[in-house]
Amino acid sequence: MTAATARRPVVDRFGPLYPASAMALPVIPRLPMPRLAAPPPDVRNLSAHYRDHYGPHILREYPVGDSGDRIVVVDKAFPHSVYDMMLLATVGDDTVIASSVSDVPEAMLTTLLTFCGQFVRYVHASSTRRRFGLDGAQLMIGTNYDPSTTDRDNGQWWDKRMHWHLNCWPTTAYRDASMASLGDVNDVNRRRALVDPIAHLAARIMRDAIRTQPLPTGCRLADDTDLNPEGGPVGFKIALPGWDFLPDTTCARLLVHLHDVAAGAYAQLRRCFTGSPAASPPWTRPGLLPPGQVAANLDELTWLSEPARQGLRTLRSLLRDVTTGEMNLMRADMDLANRCLTLAGLDYHLGFWSPPQPGSSRGRAPVYLVMQFKLLSAIGSSPAIGGSVASILDRFRGPIMSAQQTRLRRQFQDRFLALLDCHTEGVNVSNRMPDAAMGTSITPEILAFYAHGAEQERLNDPRRHIEYLRTIDILTRHLPTAGIVADVGGGPGAYALRLAADGHRVHLVDPVPLHLEQAEARCADAESPLASILRGDARRLPLGSGSCDTVLLLGPLYHLTDAADRARAWAEAHRVLVPGGVVAAAATSRFYTTWEYLAKNLYDDPAVEAILARHLCDGQHRNPTGDRRLFTTGYFHSPRELAVEASTAGLRPHALLAVEGAAKLLPDLAERLRDPHRRDLLLRAMRRVEAEPSLLGMSEHILLIAHKPAPDSTTQETT
């Protein structure tokens, strides 16, 4: 089927499809949305695997079952609101492109809807409303279906995988919007984008197709009269018992049933119009049957009501075939194709809508399941916001998000993900892979060393605090100002929480259960919580390829005694980094301990001298004495060795820095750190000599800063 001629008419050719009352419908022709300062290029996602496209925008992955199915939480590159995110359904490790609710297993669809229900509860929670100013916020949750159209912008241009948008608009997003009547929108394409000419007719047809079939208990067919007091979307609607219906398996089955009914009805109608039920290949549309033949075919569909039949006859009178020459013109001019070519197959937006809820009326607002069918407009929802039946969100020319909006967006997402993490603890969905799969085997002596719990307070010790201050100083100067950080071996979260407070989205990974418990307890009280707290280790990270801007290895390397294990840790850091991403890796110097053990009067013990002799020789540190002052099983590097390991993994070192230098040998270090003036003098002095090669071995810890080069990078390495 094809639509209008290439010439833009002053009067919409398809205007007769609108009921007379439609022109009075309230709409918002343009609603600017805050946008990211530097979004990625707007391209189709035709990548072989979803991680290749979404990479750093992936917030979390939740496996469902044991067949490689996953629900992927994505931070939108082109947000619909400051407070939104997306759920992507991937089937069979993304070997199957599932476009509809009937393409995914029932367990996955039920889990998706459960996550949607969790989002609603999260937004409605009084703590969320207070924190983010969401009293009276507008919710819209929906997915788009159009697996066939690739020859014009259909609103699902970028990804044919089923994905659910979780959108929340605070009142500040729409309270000043300019409302108009649909009939006052003079731009025909904008009018169609607000309310597709087929919308009312398709809703009537869908009602005809389903009217004899029972609906689940508590559900009923609704029409536009149900929504008059509050506004609301145009389309086929079913009133639901409430938001708590979403996690019910019955809801998933209802969605599948509606899709199947719609697909069956569309196939019959397409056969009536063209003689074939099949969707069109790109840049083709089937020829139309003569109007009389179409009318005769429609008469054979006994389930159609007479108003629907008459509307379809009108539609046939408005459609015409596109010539080969016209198709070639449209192929060369995508804007022309968007205006003049119909969508290629069954196309709809399926969503859940409810009017805004003031805090005083929590739980009372009706909830509707809405199917909006499309023929001429993009299939994405034009959401019913602020008393309108539709609005056009301008996601490309709106104001750039302020620093405060960006910070609130991140906090909003992180707190919702924390809620999902808690919810998935008891079901067959998790963002934590089994420990065996993660390779979290650590030696008993290392586990016993950290089981005492001293790591939580170690950096607060006056003589250890210099390590924390200097590490933060170096990271602040060398890390991106904001981004996604993997703190691998992050322990109880000292550095992770500091970076989160500075605006980073931080995933903490650690193999020690006690550290995870301590991190979770600290995170619960933090103003800026962590994005996730995961059990795993550096050799096999529970993070997607290209998902991080920064990787911290501030502990793993001196516990991986085997060179092959350290190589795997470096390779994993390389894998999860985006091109240009930064890795900061710490090592323990094999030379520093000589001076520390002398200062502590430990050197006269033959066992201590034997420990030193070994790690000075080959870096292998073993402590058979049980004295915790002598650390535990580990590997101590030479300074140059650290840079060589990073280079071998394909990373480009560009700074090799002493963390504490010789400062820990100062007898009055604690007093210096307590005095702000003396502390600043000390830190400035240390910064001046931090990169001096001849002094690196005197530092207990050495910090390497490297980056993952782009394919054409020629950055000079540090040796």
Image: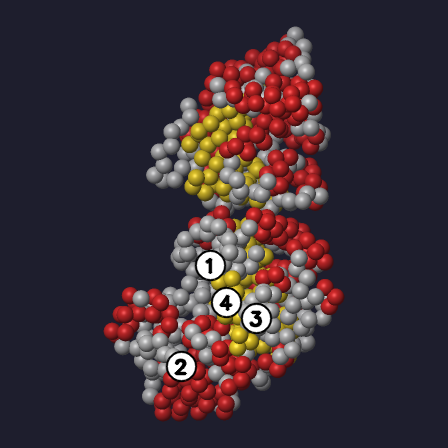
- Left or right, residue 73 beside residue 423: left
> Are the residues at dot 3 and dot 2 in contact (C-beta closer than 8 Å)?
no
* The N terminus - image quarter: bottom left
Which dot marks residue 614?
Answer: none
Spatial distance from mark 4 to mark 2, Cα to Cα? 21 Å
Q: Earlier in the sequence, mark 4 or mark 2?
A: 2
Query: Whole-percent x and y of residue 133?
Result: 66, 57
Check disc 4 and give the amino acid type.
Arg
Q: Which residue is drawn at 60% across and 46% down?
A: 531
Q: Which of marks 4 and 1 is nearer the N terminus?
A: 4
Which dot marks residue 11?
Answer: 2
In the rendered view, how is the structure colored? secondary structure
Query: Whole-percent x and y of residue 250?
Result: 63, 70
Spatial distance from mark 3 to mark 4, Cα to Cα? 12 Å
Spatial distance from mark 3 to mark 2, Cα to Cα? 25 Å
Q: Earlier in the sequence, mark 3 or mark 4?
A: 4
What residue would you read off at disc 3? 384
Check disc 1 and give the amino acid type.
Arg
Spatial distance from mark 2 to mark 1, Cα to Cα? 28 Å
Secondary structure of the residue carrying tag 4 is strand
What residue would you read off at disc 4? 30
> Are the residues at dot 1 and dot 3 in contact (C-beta closer than 8 Å)?
no
- Rendered position, 510 above or below 173: above
- Rendered position, 260 above or below 301: above
- Left or right, residue 704 beside residue 119: left
What residue would you read off at disc 1? 397
**Identity of the residue furthest to the right in this view:** 360
Frontmost residue, 242 versus 603: 242
Query: Whole-percent x and y of residue 277?
Result: 39, 78
Crowding at label 2, few (<14), some or many (≥20) Cα neighbours within 10 Å? few
